[in-house]
Amino acid sequence: MKHAVLALLFSGLSTFSAIATFSTIAAFASTAQAAQVNVYSARQEELIKPVLDKFSAQTGIQVNLITGKPDELISRMASEGRNSPADVLISTDVGRLYRAQTQGLLQPITSDALNAAIPAHLRDPAKHWFGLTTRARPIMYLPGKVDPKQLSTLEDLASDKWRGRICIRSSDNIYNQSMLAAMIAEIGEEKTLAFAKGLVANFAQPPKGGDRDQIKAAAAGVCDIAIANTYYLAGMFDEPADAKAAQQVKVFWPNQADRGAHINISGAGVAKYAPNKAAAQQLIEYMVQPEAQNWYATANHEYPVLVGVKWSPVLESFGTFKADPLPLVKLGELNSKALMLMDQAGWK
């Protein structure tokens, strides 16, 4: 099965693509540098550099940044082994952080500051990774085509009334894998498989493109419902080319009468062989302080992990919701089962 092949690819080495850097690897290795921290980030440069610059300005610690695709960064760390200059890995989706952890690429750290700022279900019980922001994956619908009174739970999207009306990304996507893993933890494998089969039967088109493409497809009339992460929709309002499509859909929060809406994180961990461990921990602790959390909420349209930090106005317009309190480590633990069920359901 294709996902078995993907799992093998992810566990091995891969060719690392061209990536943006702010210093060379030679600079990373230099012992002549003052206090510094080397960051491997799966967040795009514009979504992470401003907060790293603020950290440097406050602490005097130089941040050396390499950005790349999440799985490529993990493979790079694995191939570098003990010689890796990485101090911090920042990645989207707990499934990837869990993968790095199980490959022995992260080390546990003890931090009262992180424990106080981050709710327990958003961090690794073994202290290898910590949530920096949360993101939700709700139902997005066309008001002219869907009466919100018809909507209730994710599970209901498998019912016949939605035949040919749903757009969602492929099963290769980690966000969908984590969503299914959460369902396995909550309702069991049998019911999750039934859901996946019903959902596949209700696809409006073969899965293709990213989350924004699903929203655009709904706006174009290809489907009536799209499943996407909130920050993608929120970001579309900021871009003239996408704003019109974003304005055509509404957000519905599923499962509010039971477990709550599915959420995930972007997060960070200290690399196993971090040459600057103290600075690495200091950086991660900074990223859950109010200043950094406010920046994330405003610039990236992600939900802060720190209680009391205001959401961006666009996120506020989506409404408040009950979030699933499931310990997110389950999403990593159940990823392989989620992939298996998606294959069985014919989710391409």
Image (cartoon, rainbow, N blue to C red):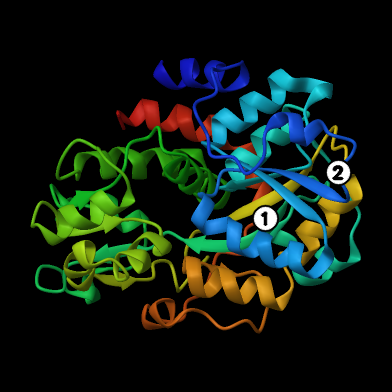
Q: Quadrant of the N terminus?
A: top left
On the picture, is 240 further left or further right than 322? left
Q: Give the SS element for disc 2.
A: loop
Secondary structure of residue under mark 1: loop
- Give the vertical position of 297 relative to 313 (above or below): above
Q: Residues within 10 Å of mark 2 (few under 14, many from 20)?
A: few
Q: Are marks 2 and 1 in contact (CB under 8 Å)?
A: no
Q: Which residue is mark 2?
A: 33
Kind of residue sitting beneath label 2: Gln
Q: Position of residue 179 (x, y in %)?
A: 47, 48
According to the picture, the residue beneath numbered tag 1 turns out to be 327
Give residue 27's position: percent from left, percent from top: 75, 35
- Nearer to the camera, 211 or 339: 211
Q: Residue visible at 59% across and 63% down?
A: 50
- Residue extending farthest to the front is 32
Q: Residue at x 89, y 60 (%)?
A: 111
Q: Which residue is located at x 28 percent, y 64 percent?
A: 140
In the image, what residue type sits under mark 1?
Answer: Pro
Kindly report which numbered mark, 2 or 1, lies closer to the viewer in this rendering: 2
Relative to 105, 293 lies left or right: left
Rendered position, 195 above or below 141: above
The residue located at (38%, 70%) in the rendering is 253
